[in-house]
Image (tube, helix red, strand yellow):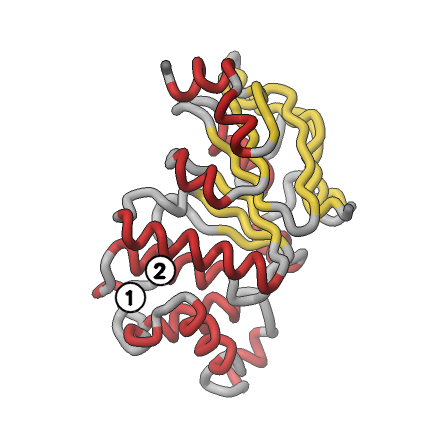
Amino acid sequence: MTAVLEVSNLSKRFGGIVAVDNVSFTVNDGDILGIIGPNGSGKSTLFNCVLGQLIPTEGSVRIDGQDSTGMRPCDLNRLGVSRTFQLLQVFPQLSVRDNLILAGQEHQGSMTSRLFGRPDAGLGEAAEQMIAFFRLTHLADEQAGMLSYGQQKLLDAAMAFMAGPRLVLLDEPAGGVNLTMLGLLRERLQAYHAERKATFVVIEHQMEFVMALCTRVLVLAEGRIIAEGAPEEVRRNPAVIEAYLGH
């Protein structure tokens, strides 16, 4: 299998606090890896080290074999890496369609092409396809700020996929979403994975969402990996039950 993401012996310290402690894992082409763990386990710090928001104290990150350690997010975009955030990044005054077009523009074209190219940057058709795929057709012309929180989460996910990325990192996509919309989001992510063989990494607190979506789960506690494997295997692991489930 081809390794899309390789994290090797990665650590991040803040003074005397070790937030991530010698973490290594590989994400292969077509994987959906879930990263779970209790609050303070190092999940967000790990994500931010992979995505260039933080520079690791030790260790390395590679994308498709290329060293990307400390690489800026804009340069990671060019390698085909996309992400969502815990806090929504939609533009509330723009329509759903224009949010998607803007997301696509971040990954392609020069400033000249943006100034003198087509008004939709040539992304109108791709935006319509993504709108239909994520079941947002009836909301295409609505301002994003007028959508429900769950609908905005769907839009946020659609924006992350606009450029057909090689690797998508989803930061708590289920957070604050009601059960009905959560089911739709999970089903759409699974469908996207099945149709396009996309590769995801998901950080999430919602255990059932992760277990239903992910092909493999990694568990962090106190900055270290305490378990890794298939969802059902991880669910039964005594160390996970103690550290994460608390019973």
Q: Which of 88 and 119 is in front in this view?
A: 88
Residue at numbered disc 2? 90
Element under disc 1: helix
Mark 1–mark 2 distance (CA, rounded to whole Å)? 7 Å
Whether pointer 1 and pointer 2 mark residues with C-beta atoms closer than 8 Å, the reply is yes
Mark 2 Cα within 10 Å, few/some/many (few <14, many 20+)?
Answer: many
Relative height, residue 195 to residue 237 (above, below): below
Query: Which callout, 1 or 2, points at the residue further toward the start of the chain?
Result: 2
Residue 21 falls in image quadrant: top right
Q: Where is residue 123 in the image (x, y as percent from the top left)?
A: 51, 79
Q: Position of residue 72 (x, y in %)?
A: 60, 48
Q: What residue type is labelled 1?
A: Ala
Q: What residue type is labelled 2?
A: Val
Residue at numbered disc 1? 144
Q: Residue at x 50, y 55 (%)?
A: 190
Does the rendering let one see residue 247?
A: yes
Does the rendering let one see residue 14?
A: no
Q: Where is residue 44 in the image (x, y as percent from the top left)?
A: 47, 33
Relative height, residue 52 to residue 56 (above, below): below
Element under disc 2: loop
